[in-house]
Amino acid sequence: MHELGIVFYIIRDVKKAAQENGVEHVNTVVMNIGEVSTVVPEYLTDCWRWAADKEDVLRGCELRCNILPAVTVCNACGKEYPTVEYGRTCPHCGSEDTVLLRGNEVEIKEIEV
């Protein structure tokens, strides 16, 4: 479970942003999680609850996760398609010359105070 390690990085970054902006308490952190990022949102929120409550600035802070769909583009025909449904093979032309455009993100979207 690498979610705990990710939570430590989120906490570090949120604490730094709070300190730089003179914020005493953060109410909510909103994350963008790509559907093929290998991060399990339920594990992330469980780890968050345990770790965030150890920090004064984050005690009781909610972690919300937006799941971003994975999208792949085909280099052969130029069309985009849903990655999870079709994998690496383009459903439009059958090419395997494809690239993941988005869907592997793990990023802080918002910090609400």
Image (cartoon, helix red, strand yellow):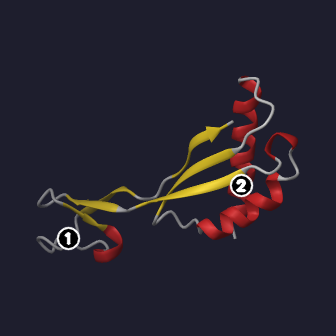
Q: Where is residue 105 in the image (x, y as percent from the top left)?
A: 48, 53
Q: Which amino acid lies under the numbered mark 1 shown in the image of this protein?
A: Cys
Camera-nearest residue between 101 and 57: 57
x, y percent for residue 44: 67, 63
Which residue lies under the disc numbered 1?
90
Q: Could you say whether the residue bearing mark 1 is in a helix, strand or loop?
A: loop
Q: Are marks 1 and 2 in contact (CB under 8 Å)?
A: no
Image: 112 above or below 31? above
Instruction: Say which quadrant the C terminus sits in.
Output: top right
Residue 76 picture quarter: bottom left
- Residue, disc 2: 7
| For residue 87, side relative to residue 53 (left or right) | left
Distance between the Cα atoms at labels 1 and 2? 35 Å
Q: In screen coordinates, is 1 left or right of 24?
A: left
Picture residue at 70% right of the left edge, 71% below the top? 1
Q: Where is residue 89 in the image (x, y as percent from the top left)?
A: 24, 74
Tell which circle, 1 or 2, labels the residue nearer the N-terminal end: 2
Image depth: mark 1 or mark 2 in front = 2
